[in-house]
Amino acid sequence: MLIEYHHLPAKNVISSQLIYFVLFMLEEIRVTFRQDLKLDVVGFHIDAKDGDISMTPRWLAKVLNKKEVVDIQDIDASSYVSRSLNRERIARPHDLSGIDPDFYIRMKDYLEDSKEIDRERFCVSLNSFIASRLEKIAKLAAASPLSPELKDKLSVEEYELYLMMHDASDLFKESVLDKYG
């Protein structure tokens, strides 16, 4: 289920970020139980044995993982983020590669779960990725309104950034050109 965040006014970006975070945390992910567990809380019923594999909401999997009750078998977040970084790196200088609306939410989750040494190495690549996208978004936002094709390539945070930069660019042009533009 995707939220059509493009229809939300720019001032609602916090709400749309929250929506995507909640959807991310509600996603079902595969877990392997490390011990027997019987649980019945607020509509969640679990009756699992050591070694059982099951699907559970991400938020619950994270709680149970911290308690060393399950191992999370999520898609390889490292590969997902690395593929996005590589697609942006090889994109033409004026083109944005497409990322998912919840890319930065997934990226933050990956960073939180990473070991310190992996996090530091990853942040170096991530800073380059963000700088590249910021530069491209700034140029595109100053040049034209947001097209539907470009809208589909942006995360929810980048969508907000684009709208703010475009509005600021228009205001600047109006103030500089005044009535002569």
Image: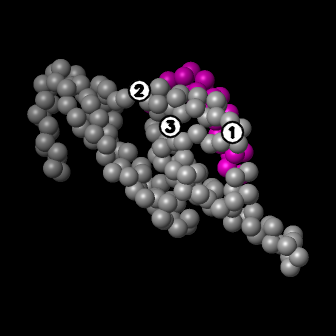
Q: Select label 2 or label 1 by which is in front.
A: 1
Q: Which residue lies under the disc numbered 1?
A: 132
Q: Residue at x 48, y 65 (%)?
A: 8
Q: Which residue lies under the disc numbered 3?
A: 107
Residue closest to the eye, 18 or 4: 4
Distance (Cα) linking label 2 and label 1: 24 Å
- Residue 40 is left or right of residue 57, and the answer is left
Relative image position of residue 104 (x, y in whole percent): 52, 43
Q: Which residue lies under the disc numbered 2?
A: 76
Q: Residue at x 69, y 45 (%)?
A: 136
126 part of magenta stretch: yes
Instruction: Name above or below for residue 96 compared with residue 3.
Output: above
The residues colored magenta run: 111-138
The kind of residue tagged 3 is: Met
Q: Quadrant of residue 163?
A: bottom right
Distance (Cα) linking label 3 and label 1: 16 Å
Say if residue 102 shows up in the picture. Answer: yes
Tell me the element at label 2: loop
Give the residue furthest to the bottom.
Answer: 179
How packed is label 1: few (under 14 Cα within 10 Å), some, or many (20 or more)? some
Instruction: Name above or below for residue 104 compared with residue 170.
Output: above
Instruction: Name above or below for residue 50 compared with residue 101.
Output: above
First in sequence: mark 2 vs mark 1: 2
How packed is label 2: few (under 14 Cα within 10 Å), some, or many (20 or more)? few
